[in-house]
Image: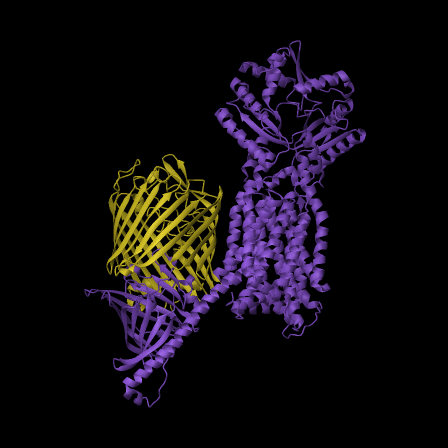
Amino acid sequence: MVDSGTVMDRFVVAFTQGVIRFRYLVVLAMIVVPILVGSGAGKLQFSSDYRVFFSGENEDLENFEKFQEVYTKNDNFLFVVVSSEGDIYTKESLSAVKKITDDAWQIPFANRVDSLANFQHSYSEDDDLVVEELIGSADDLNSDVIQRLRHVADSEPLIKNSFINASGTAAAINVTLQYPGDDLSELPKAVAKAREIKADIEEKNPGLRVYLTGFSMLNNAFSEAGFMDTVNLMPVMFLVFLLALILTLRSFFAVLTTVVVVLLSMMVAMGVGGWSGVLLTPISNSAPIIVLTLAVADVVHILFTMKKLMRRGVPKREALIDAMRINFVAVSVTSLTTVIGFMSLHFADSPPYWHLANMASAGIVTAWLLSLTLLPALVSFFPVSVKTKSVGGGGRTIWDSFSFFVIRNAKAIVVVGLVCCVALASLIPTVKLEDSWSDYFSENIEFRRDTDQATKSFGLYPIEYSIPAIHSQGISRVEYLDKLEEFTEFLRAQDNVAHVYSMSDVFKKLNKNMHGDDESFYRLPDSHEEAAQYLLLYELSLPYGQDLNDRVNIDKSATRITVTMNKVTTKQTIEFIDATNLWMESNLPGYMQARPTSGQVMFSYIAERNVKAMVSGTLLAFFLIAIIMMVVLGSFGMGLISLIPNCLPVVAAFGVWTLINGAVGFSVAAIASISLGIVVDDTVHLLVKYSKARKEKGFSVERAIAYALNHVGSAILINTFVLVAGFAVMANSNFKVSADMGALTLMTIAIAAILDFLLLPAFIYLVCKRKEAKKVMRENDSSALAKAATSVGLVVVMLGVLSFPERVMAGSGDVVVKNGFDIFARSDRSDRDFKDSRVELKMSLENSAGEVAERTLQITTLEVADEGVGDKSLVVFGTPLDIQGTSLLSHAKILDADDQWVFLPSIKRVKRISSKNKSGPFVGSEFAFEDITGLELNKYAHEYLLEEACGELFCDVVKSVPQYEYSGYSFLKIWIDQDEYQIRQVEYYDRRGDLLKTLTMANYKKYGDVWRPQVMSMVNHLTNKGTTLAYGEYEFNMGLSDADFSKGRLGRN
Amino acid sequence: MALFRGLGSAIFVCSSLFVNSAACDQVSFSGELGGWARYYPDEPQWVGQEQGNDLELTFAPGVSWVSEDGLSTVVAEMFFRGNSSDKNRNHVDLSELLYTRKYSGFDISLGVGKVFWGTTESRHLVDVVNQTDAVEELKHEQKLGQPMLNVNVYRDWGALGFFYLPYFRERTFPAIDGRQRYEKPVDTDNPVYRGGGGRETQDFSIRYSHYVDDFDFALYFFDGINRAPAYVESGDYLSPIYYQMSQVGFDGQYVYDALLVKYEQIIQENEVERYAASVAGLEYTFYSVWDKVWDVGLIAEYLYSGKEFGGRDLFDDDVFVGVRAAMNDVADTTLLAGAYLDSNDGDVIFLAEFESRVSSRTTLGVKVELFSGRGSVADLDHDDLIEVSYKIFF
């Protein structure tokens, strides 16, 4: 990234200048377009069906839909009547029940009403089956009738705990509805009527309380909670946000600009939702709050940098452009990571998360775009005044003191930080994954209050089974009924079961009725025929609207069992379901196996499903973000370090949550990926600045840390404040899923900020300092070596003077203290500056028996001018034919292992290979790879040994010690001639210091200014094998570039 | 347009080659003639299978052309195979006919080509562009040519590759008389396409690859037909079903001294399911062991797949352990041996490959595959194979 800095910088500067030049146009376009997109927000409507929480692929939903096709829809109102006197068996109460039962028919789309009043009571009269409503008319209710009623209700399992609670203090009326589903106003109409009935009863009977709940009320609550959030939270949010901006930016126009950018981003977020036909839920409805919170960050960073520059006396326009240049990469990357975090919500199983992902992402992208266009355009209009500070030394800032503190206590901070995080993380396994869907709503919502009351008397959470029989009419078979009864009994014995509605009870009652109401016949009929006849008789006696179609399917091959649970959590429900499934498997015949279904079942698994689905989403987000960090920071290690302050906060926040709450639900799935995308921002800003200080300014670790904190510390603090405030507001949502999400994200962000300020700099300091120390040691070593070399050289020269006096004379008394480094450098540099070269060569491998094998290869080299970095080279094989086209690309490094890739043409595979072993044999030859690509100056510490004759020339002999840790050689002896400064011979000594190989270079040829040997032969003294390289004509300066030596091009050359 | 002219002129130059070979010194021919002997020690297990011990000939002639300035290239290669016992093995394939033009910073390829993606050794999970010649071998390295338009852009922040793949080729499978097949042979004549695609599909992919320090990685998105079919039983055959899919893939490798850490991951979504699969592993090389020239690498990889529909993956929860030895001699002798161990049913697949050069133009290879188990590899249990190949290059 640093390399492209200049290109990127130039682009951003030119772009911003363009924006300022055409600012009228930019302001117009960047306000009009978002408003147009935002106008889609008008199309947004709240969903009125809890099924929107389940995707079309959700198996539980599919099962439930099938079930409802067979029986009846589960959309209902449940009126619960409670008397203040306690006993429900009073004329007043029962009349009210009767009245609600009758009035309920007027609720739009009602297709069935069930209560104590219209319960189809059967008894025998003169051997006839009589079926009639329990309360025919409210006027008939005298104490005798009421007494009889109480008796029936007490003994009838279909009534007890279903229409009357066990203690006889509350009555329930259940209204089933069939919505045509044509438009969203159906539900509110029905709810309005139901509320009217409730109000009417309460008004006329001051002694009675009526609670209204059921799935229709639940559906209604979703839209009401969303609406209340908008009404209650948005104004608070705006206030907090304005306050924060005014306090920190302290400039009217800066605040105004920020508000405009943020509002437009919010509008686009909602508009995108509207245009794409999203039905709002309380979850997706939190998008505007999230966008509002996140959009601030971009603006604050840019404005802050600008003001900082202006304070130093830079004129406004230049300060603005420079602020854009400085922040462009960080702002873009943070927006990208946040979008990735949100987009990974698409892995979740619940569509509202998808909607949230799309809307929030649209808002964030808009905020980014507007920050780059509208922001500079607007700022260029407005006056911005700052107090100019004298540039001078500046004195210590608070951030300087802070970074000093962190560095001094680095070890303690890292240890304490990690210990705290590990301790919090260790709490997580104790967290319970549980929810209760009526608790999704806060007590501000009427549904929650009424449901809490209603569940004191009645179960509310249905679990449905459709138990199949063996074939048509099979439900009257003896075995089926026996097993059904057994199952019913089992269910009733379970914890938390309030009521079980089973056809076995109906059959038992009918059997009793048909035997003159003899209690001893209150058992299942003895034969298939009897049961079938009774059922037929009973059906014929039922009035319209009270038929058995909601209990028995059309061809009588299955019956329905409804288990109504008390107020249970999802976890308890799952335990119940697991226990029941186990019982069914071992006790019911194969054909009677059935799976539970219902809204309760669906909600019980939704958290688990979402968590499971989000695992891959979160991992993917994590991965992408890690990679982005590595690319942006240009370093694998820094990328990894950056993950520490990004992942730990999520873990720690869950730990804290476990401590204070103990349970997580539906919302838990989304939090990790959302907050990861957000918290990474601070790290990006800090690390980008740190890397810049290290690489571009060459600061020490300590100074770079202080530099980074000075530059972005304040902006990060403000952002954290705004984010925490934003999510704190969200934590007050009336919808628990959103509230939990807000609270958990808030904690994550707060912890992340702490870690970013303390742990990250401390960690960087410890890691980088150690590396640096290692490097310094190495440098010291080599400078010591150089010193030693000089002194040794001096002694050698002195000896030389004594033993070869003539030669010293010939040098006309010019005694020069020779230095190994200089000699090698002169040789190396005389052959440099060739830009690039290409040569074909023939390699002949000869074994000790004199057998020769040949291979041809082509070597292309790109010179890298910096002597601290190695050259790039590409070796392509021509023969043997089976390896034709095999290529080896190497980006040499001086002190580290090279970057090497090999291309295998037969399968077109590019493979990064370990180049640790630079000295290993190259394609079976006596050359190591490092022997072929050349001897580079800084790879060795050079020491002058002596001079001696080499062939017709005089050579300086230099001892070169490899600086690369894993070199296979302990040292090399290199003969460099004194005329052309070319290497004539090299001896390689192995790690034990024994002579291993000798390389002879001959037939030097001059190409322009550079010399190249045309023949190189290597002899291995241990094996007596030899390899000769015969070079062809070199080509130089062909205009090759880095792209020709890039990994991507490998195999295309 | 320039692209087509280039391709046209390249073909022209090469077709006129025989008339005037002096003008065509940029053109080079190559070829590979292979003789294969296969031996199956066990009797076949399934109805219709023949013993299959046979000899086979393959011939792969190729021609390549490089323009004067070295920026344009055309490579072409055919593949012929003749075999005595499995009719599905006899085929002719245009495995490559690719025109490539290099520009500064990007290049364009048009034609039929082969692409390889990935880092791991035991399985090439992320490698999805080319169809596999599945009659060939276990590791799916033998590929059929894929028509493509490919643009690669090289920047200092990484390389971006765009692939437009306008034609789909079905996988080859052993015929009823062939060895190493499922209990029921795959009905290659009646493929089923689901989710929109057909042979004339318009697949595309975009791939970003880069490296940071010692960490190489790539990330891609692919939208098109899954090259690997699902199967449903229909009568005596398995019907191959080719699903339209969207896939995100990642592969990475980190080099730490002599240790390579490798990882491949895909997340695939098609009409019936969304699943993830991964391969993760290590390779550690001991350099200069014995005789001071051998390189010996130890490989351990874990393979996982969450695929559930249309036949589970053979490698759904497996461990691969292997050894690679390079003798670094004149003959470039290499040996790779390893075993896949299924952690669910304990089934084992053993694989060994040996290759060495005999003369400068010929190589000798030996491959051994052993299958053992009654679980996931039950269908292949009798199909242990010893194969000797001799190749002549010219």
- The picture quadrant where one finds residue A970 is bottom left
In the rendered image of the structure, the colour used to display chain A is purple
Image location of residue A154, percent across then percent down: 67, 20
Q: Residue at x 44, y 58 (%)?
A: B216
- Answer whether residue A268 is visible to the viewer in this image: no
Q: Is residue A179 left or right of residue B383?
A: right
Image quadrant holding the C terminus of chain A, namely bottom left
Looking at the image, which residue sits at the far left? A849
B339 lies above or below A641: above
Side (left or right) of A963 relative to B22: right
Figure quadrant of residue A519: top right
What is the residue that sits farthest to the top in this orientation?
A: A126
Q: Choose between A234 and A114: the one closer to the eye.
A: A234
Q: Specify whether B344 is left or right of A496.
A: left
Across the whole image, how many numbered discs are drawn on residues?
Answer: 0
User: Can residue A358 be seen in the rendering of this structure?
Assistant: yes
Q: Where residue A754 appears, x then y in whole percent?
A: 60, 56
The tint of chain B in the picture is yellow
Question: A407 or A715: which is nearer to us?
Answer: A407
Q: Position of residue A747 (x, y in %)?
A: 62, 51
Q: Is residue A170 above or below residue B215?
A: above
- Depth order, front residue of A65/A565: A565
Q: Position of residue B283 (x, y in %)?
A: 38, 54
Q: How is the image coloured?
A: by chain
In the rendered view, tell whether residue A909 sits above or below residue B278: below
Q: Residue A847 sits in which quadrant? A: bottom left
Q: Decide: is B213 above or below A110.
A: below
